[in-house]
Image (cartoon, grey):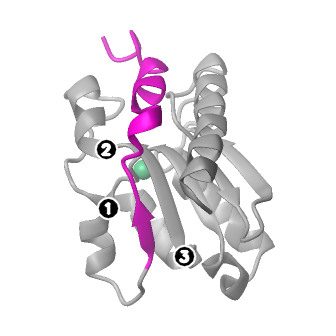
Amino acid sequence: MNHKDHIRFLKRAIEVSRESREHGNTPFGAILVDGEGNILMEQGNVEITENICTGHAETTLAARASHKYTKDFLWNCTLYTTAEPCAMCAGAIYWANIGNVVYGMTERQLLSMTGSNEINPTFDLPCRNVFSCGQKEIQVTGPIDEVVEEAAKIHEGYWD
Ligand SMILES: [Zn+2]
């Protein structure tokens, strides 16, 4: 995938994050793309409507993907997410063996928006730091400047 592809897929993930908010969940979205550029799965946050504390978009997507695909297959897939994966989601991506991650805005930027909101008391921990302590060379790309504003816009007014 090249930079243009990254922008295109992140824009789709942003749409998923918008739908997540519209459906009563936090404004996060993730999609899974295979090595040929096909979108295999889309996932919004489900924490609130399903009352599950681990219901982040990326963790839920990684779990679903692991039910459906082999680890070898997932190693060549890419998870696109509107905001940088948190520590839990980075862990889920690691365990699912998804080999590539592309994110829109950094977790630190997200933290600047959520503050200490109890729904999402955001970490300040780059996902690269989590992956660097593991045993796999997961490729991380982000932030993607061209989509940062659009990704952040979906959060407007949500955490106030
Ligand atoms: Zn997370």
**Element under label 1?**
helix
Cβ of disc 2 within 8 Å of ligand 1?
A: no
Cβ of disc 1 within 8 Å of ligand 1?
A: no
First-in-chain label (2 vs 1): 2
Q: Is residue 67 above or below residue 150?
A: below
Residue occupied by mark 1: 127
Q: Nearer the viewer, residue 134 or 99?
A: 99
Badge number at residue 99: 3
Where is residue 18, by image quadrant? top right
Is-magenta flag for residue 77?
A: no
Q: Nearer the viewer, residue 143 or 46?
A: 143
Measured Cα–Cα span from mark 1 to mark 3: 13 Å
Which span is picked out in magenta?
A: 138-160
Instruction: Check the picture and name the quadrant holding the N terminus.
Output: bottom right
Residue 154 visible, this orientation: yes
**How many C-alpha atoms fall within 10 Å of the one at disc 3: few (<14), some, or many (≥20)?**
many
Instruction: Check the picture and name the quadrant holding the C terminus.
Output: top left
| Residue positioned 26% across, 81% down in the render | 133
Do the residues under discs 1 and 3 have CB atoms within 8 angstroms? no
First-in-chain label (3 vs 2): 3
**How many C-alpha atoms fall within 10 Å of the one at disc 2: few (<14), some, or many (≥20)?**
many
Do the residues under discs 3 and 2 have CB atoms within 8 angstroms? no
x then y, percent, for residue 91 = 41, 69
Residue occupied by mark 2: 106
Where is residue 38, by image quadrant? bottom right
Q: Nearer the viewer, residue 32 or 93?
A: 32
Amino acid carrying mark 3 in the image: Gly
x then y, percent, for residue 142 = 39, 53
Cβ of disc 3 within 8 Å of ligand 1?
A: no
| Residue positioned 26% across, 35% down in the render | 109
